[in-house]
Image (cartoon, rainbow, N blue to C red):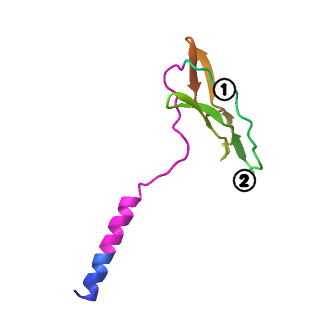
Amino acid sequence: MTTSRVFQAGLAALMLASVTMTGCVVTARPAYYGGAVVTVAPPAPQVEVMGVAPAPGYVWMGGYWDWVGGRHVWVGGHWMAGRPGYHWVPHHWVAVGGGYRLSAGHWER
């Protein structure tokens, strides 16, 4: 096999590997529940240490209790870049129909 063919085969293998790995995403946060009514009340919020914002204009997104695998799981807060003209409305549980439903956090004008 010539040097040119070896180079072409290696380049093709490298391109195939990069294409198959581009869609790889890893996250440590559980998925937001927001589904049906849960009959188990969420525990009291955990105390979190916010620390210093990483840059001016960042907003603290406080942690909340999510519903994962049939139980409440704490999702820790984090800093996020703010949106000018908006304020952050945190996740919160709403009492409905003899249970509780998680209302998603969102930006509001």
Q: Quadrant of residue 67?
A: top right
User: In screen coordinates, is 73 left or right of 20?
Assistant: right
**What numbered label is drawn on residue 78?**
none
Q: Toward the viewer: 46 or 11? A: 46
Q: Position of residue 10 (x, y in %)?
A: 32, 77
Q: Toward the viewer: 6 or 56? A: 6
Magenta stretch: helix, strand or loop mostly: loop
Q: What residue is pinned by disc 1?
A: 43
User: In screen coordinates, is 39 left or right of 15?
Assistant: right
Q: Quadrant of residue 21?
A: bottom left
For label 1, the SS is: loop
Q: Is residue 52 above or below residue 73?
A: below
The furthest residue to the top:
97
The furthest residue to the bottom:
2
Q: Quadrant of the C terminus?
A: top right
Q: What residue is pinned by disc 2?
A: 54
Does the magenta-highlighted stretch encompass residue 83? no
Does the magenta-highlighted stretch encompass residue 22? yes
Tell me if mark 2 has few (under 14), some (14-19) or many (20+) residues whose alpha carbon lies within 10 angstroms of its own.
few
Comparing labels 1 and 2, the label whose residue is closer to the camera: 1
Which residue is at a point 22% across and 86% down the rendered structure image? 1
Q: Is residue 96 above or below residue 81?
A: above
Q: Position of residue 24 (x, y in %)?
A: 43, 55
Q: Position of residue 54 (x, y in %)?
A: 72, 53
Which residue is at a point 74% across and 36% down the rendered structure image? 47
Task: Choose the circle earlier in sequence order: 1 or 2.
Answer: 1
The amino acid beneath tag 2 is: Pro
The amino acid beneath tag 1 is: Pro
Q: Is residue 75 above or below residue 51?
A: above
Which residue is at a point 57% across and 15% down the rendered structure image? 99
Q: Which residues are magenta?
A: 11-38
Q: Label 1 to label 2, Cα distance in Å? A: 29 Å
